[in-house]
Amino acid sequence: MSFEYLEFGKEEKDFIEKIEEISGQNVYSCYQCGKCSAGCAFSSSMDMTVNQLIHLIQLGQKRRVLEANTHWVCASCLTCTVRCPREIDVAALMEAVREYHLREEPEKIIISEIPKKAYDKLPNIALVSNFRKKTG
Amino acid sequence: MKIGVYVCECGSNIAATVDVEDIVERAKEFPNVEVSRVYKYMCADPGQEIIKKDIEEKGLDRIVIAACSPRMHEPTFRAVLEDKGLNPYVLEIVNIREQVSWVHENKEEGTEKAASLLKGAVLRIALMEPLERKKVGVTHKALVIGGGIAGIQASLDLADMGFKTTLVEKTSSIGGKMAQMDKTFPTLDCSQCILSPKMVDVGRHPNIELLSLSEVVEVDGYVGNFKVKIKKNPRYVLEEKCTLCDDCVPVCPVIVHDEYNQGFAPRKAIYIAYPQAIPASYVIDPDACLGIDPLICSKCKDVCGPEAIDFDMQPEIIEEEYGAIIIATGYETYPIENIGEYGYGTIPDVISGLDFERIISSGGPTGGKILRPSDATVPKTVVFIHCAGSRDPSKHLPYCSKVCCMYSTKHALQYKHVVHDGTAINFYIDIRTAGKDYEEFYQRAAEEDHVIYIRGKVSEVFQDGDKILIKSVDTLTGETVELHADLVVLATGMVPSEGTKEMASLLNVSVGINGFIREAHPKLKPVDTAIGGVFVAGTVTGPKDIPETVSNASGAASRAAGILSQDELEIEGTVAKVEESLCRGCGMCVEACPYSAIELKAVNKYGHTVQVAFVNEALCKGCGSCAAACLNGAINQLGYTDGQILELISALGEQ
Amino acid sequence: MVQYSYFPGCNLKTNAKGFEETAIAVSKKLEAELVEMPKWNCCGTVHTMTSDNMMRRIAPVRVLSRSKKHIDTLEEGTTKEVVTLCSMCNSTLKIVNHEVKQNHEDLEKINYQLEEDEECYEEDMEVKHFLEIIRDNIGYEKLSQSVVKPLEGLKISPYYGCMLLHPDEAAIDDVEMPSVLEYLVESLGAEVIDSPLFKFCCGSYHIVDEEQIVDTQVGKIVEAARLRGANALVVACPLCAFNIDHQQKIMKDKNHGKEPLPVFYFTQLMALALGVPLKTNHFEDHHIDPKPLLKELGLTGKKKS
Ligand SMILES: Cc1cc2nc3c(=O)[nH]c(=O)nc-3n(C[C@H](O)[C@H](O)[C@H](O)COP(=O)(O)OP(=O)(O)OC[C@H]3O[C@@H](n4cnc5c(N)ncnc54)[C@H](O)[C@@H]3O)c2cc1C
Ligand code: SF4
Ligand code: SF4
Ligand code: SF4
Ligand code: SF4
């Protein structure tokens, strides 16, 4: 079991505010019911569930949030968004964490490393949306 | 003698497991049975008509009905008998539903059991004498004990209904805990602002006699006719003369902790609990005052212009009669110093919820500024620990105190309203917001005021420099967490007050394992007690918030009014009766009676003064404990005499 | 005959030619013709969920503005609706349309950027998916009356995927209990096989760099339909179609998996039932050839006698 020392200083508050600004969501609204994680088709591939990630955002735990793979595994299916009882656009929070990351380090994937074959085979909407989600 | 036997099928409820036709036939052979019949629903109008017709035509004088529990329809059938001019007690109801058909699967066995129960009843009823229902008068006056919001509401309701009401309050002012509160959830309206108009109403209501600094010391009697002794302690200030000028306070040399402010502020020996206190008068605290002795100090008396101070006041005993009593002696907060790991009492910046109420109150010791006790600085991080004492059957209280999730949320929100850039963290096990607009209140605290909620119970806290280190867990991430807080507020649980325990034992009402008074029925009689004429209001029966307390109090008032509005009360005829010639005055029955209905009285027997048991029929509930306890067989339970019981047993033994 | 301004989106010209050609063909048969709008651009495929990124909203707004101009040129264009076939386009255009209607400041900023294209969006468009046109404007009755070859024997599991139903602002039907595909399939004479995974995400764009995620999803989606007796799936999104179609094939080749289920666009089913020439389906672009199944059921070419 891991251990965290919680601080509620400027760094934490700035992070929360930035995520709220990008997503347009109020992260404090989340009461941690977990319905988002329960319905997410990708929870099993996430190292932290969606609601846990949101909880860490509430606590301003920037490092832990950015280290998680949760927001990268998210496929923006929006199931969480349509089901959140607190009317939180959960997928927008995932997007905000991606954006936060990409605005600091713009390349989650290196486009030039994608094999030429893929371009021929894959539908363009797959490529365009992937680049839009994973590059800044 | 002519006995009529009626067997009910209760649809298939009884008929499926008892051969009703068979027992009806057998009953015809029992002694004295004139007629024996079966019907689908005896309790229905046509069923009742059958009995009435038989009484009329066949001249029946005893009725036996085999049906459901007498708890259901005894009053129904008694009315049938009375309607036809029979004494209501020559009726016997045999419970062949709850005691037979519902608990047996085998029809043969069920039928046998029903038949023998029925026979016992027929034999017993033959020995039944008509019984009389006695009537007692009613004193149209109510006593309310405890002047918190519960007692205030109950008194006002009764007084408004026109009943003279005495409100007895132990402290110098009514108001209770609500008077100590700053704002109330979920509307955040100021507690004093909604409470003080009611207090003023109590003070000037023509039907209310308010006795402050008073305690009930003795209660005798029974429903409709309680004889009560109230001890009124001296105030040493004449209520009607005191002009609230405050001249006495500056001159008083004695400084003590002010309990109204949870000890965070000083007060003098002469003081007023708070400006809105009712009765609106100063009071001298005799324990603090230099002796209530003008020779040692009489500074206050010297300056008091209206000559309101009187050191010669003595405690008074007031004796009064009442028709009904409402216990509203409230709660206290759990002594959290018992929770060693939370450091209350040793770490100055660990405070209780009630402490926080005073600290945040604009009328409180800091004038509404949130300053922590140790160094009077504004705390930047405040941790609220839920369930402090509650939900902890291993060491503390097993139950949920119901209001603390809400008041911690209220406190966190109030803190954020004052210290905008501060951090308020609630450590909780579950968030319980089961009240109107409560969930919305909690969600607003998080959403609008950014109160943080972490699921996990704090394990311990300790002083670390000028901060408090919190060791907890975040069960949502599965991590142990630590943080430093400037102030820790414990969401203290509720326990019955000392007064509640005292009144419970004085009035003989039973209490549950947690010390709260037990209601007559937790669902259907929530404001009654097992003692007729004694009702309960507010937190005396368990943790409640203000809305629940108030409606509970109004309920108690209306139940009490149900008695006070009668001129006479009827008492059940099935009471215990002492055969004086057999009584040895041993007093075993006195011990056995759970309702204190028996006492020994001196009588003259054959020229000697001897002790004889005497039953107060108004108090007797007809439980039969005394009859069973008496070794001399001197007590009979009317309607259940030894002879009748023996007949019953013999019938059962036959099979 | 009514004419609609039709926004194709990129894939309808590449991987999903069969989707577009069958759609246009049936639209004519149903007298609700899809007329491709000129000068369209990619909508961006995914809608940005950030509140502050206006750049990504320009492309879809430009589409709306140009579609409006297109409608004005349509002889029989009677509506202010732009119609899409691809669910992703549908969702992206709908959300942006919704957003700019709510937020005039944002729209001003976007219109400022559109000045150089001589475009200006005036909030006067509605975005419709062709399924909505079928349900609300054409009607299932007309659809079933137009059927010349009922799709008897086809047991179709409707797969909505995410973007037809998410988010609420873009949903073409009840978000949790949609029925539009079910009614459509029934109207064509095929049997509906309900699957609980009707909107379980296929893995979407992860196909580019996280193929195994898509495989897991597709495996579950297909298995759920198969268990309930489906012999094919119907979709409305070229990315869902590709992922389910192509990855089934890959998985089968890789680990000798179960017999894959063919995947149809809903317009392909309509084309089959309405007697549109088979070649418009472009079944050659499918990775799992639906023809053997259709043949077995006697649904290709001439009826088995
Ligand atoms: C910190 C805190 C905050 C709270 N905040 C809220 C809130 O915001 N909203 C809300 O709805 N509820 C709140 N509550 C709950 C609220 O305090 C109670 O619901 C309410 O005060 C109960 O009133 P009562 O009359 O039953 O008891 P009490 O207020 O305890 O009144 C009992 C009265 O009886 C008197 N008494 C005791 N013994 C005797 C005796 N032997 N003889 C004569 N008199 C006696 C006492 O002096 C007292 O005046 C809060 C509770 C706490 C602890
Ligand atoms: S569904 Fe909404 S409220 Fe529930 S945990 Fe997820 S984000 Fe929070
Ligand atoms: S939008 Fe992302 S986080 Fe939400 S359910 Fe879909 S994949 Fe999971
Ligand atoms: S007598 Fe003296 S000590 Fe007592 S209240 Fe008066 S001033 Fe205070
Ligand atoms: S109301 Fe909340 S804080 Fe109080 S005991 Fe119950 S769960 Fe704990």
Image: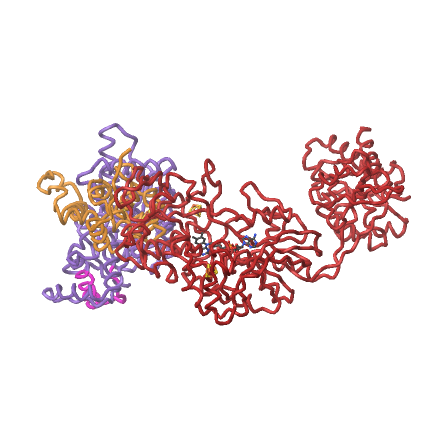
Query: Residue farthest to the front?
Result: B295
Q: Position of residue B43 (x, y in %)?
A: 75, 49
Give B604 or B144, whichever is nearer the viewer.
Answer: B604
Residue B127 vertical position relative to residue C85 in the rendered view, above or below: above
Give the image quarter of residue B653. top right
Work out whether residue C155 can be spotted: no
Query: Residue farthest to the left?
Result: A112
Residue B521 vertical position relative to residue C262 in the rendered view, above or below: below
Q: Is residue B562 magenta?
A: no
Q: Is residue C70 magenta?
A: yes
Q: Position of residue A18 (x, y in %)?
A: 20, 53
Q: B367 left or right of B531?
A: left
The span picked out in magenta is: C61-82
Give C245 or C214, whichever is nearer the viewer.
Answer: C214
Work out whether residue B590 can be spotted: yes
Give B464 or B106, whichever is nearer the viewer.
Answer: B464
The type of colouring in the image is by chain
Give the image quarter of residue B510. top right
Residue B579 vertical position relative to residue C163 in the rendered view, above or below: above
Point out the image quarter for the N terminus of chain B.
top right
Give C33 or B347, whichever is nearer the viewer.
Answer: B347
Q: Which chain is red?
A: B
Q: Position of residue B50 (x, y in %)?
A: 82, 50
Number of marks present in the image shown:
0
Q: Which chain is purple?
A: C
- The structure residue drawn at horizontal position 80% and vertical position 28%, both measured from the top left corner, is B655
Q: C83 left or right of A120?
A: right
Colour applied to chain A = orange
Q: Position of residue B571 (x, y in %)?
A: 76, 52
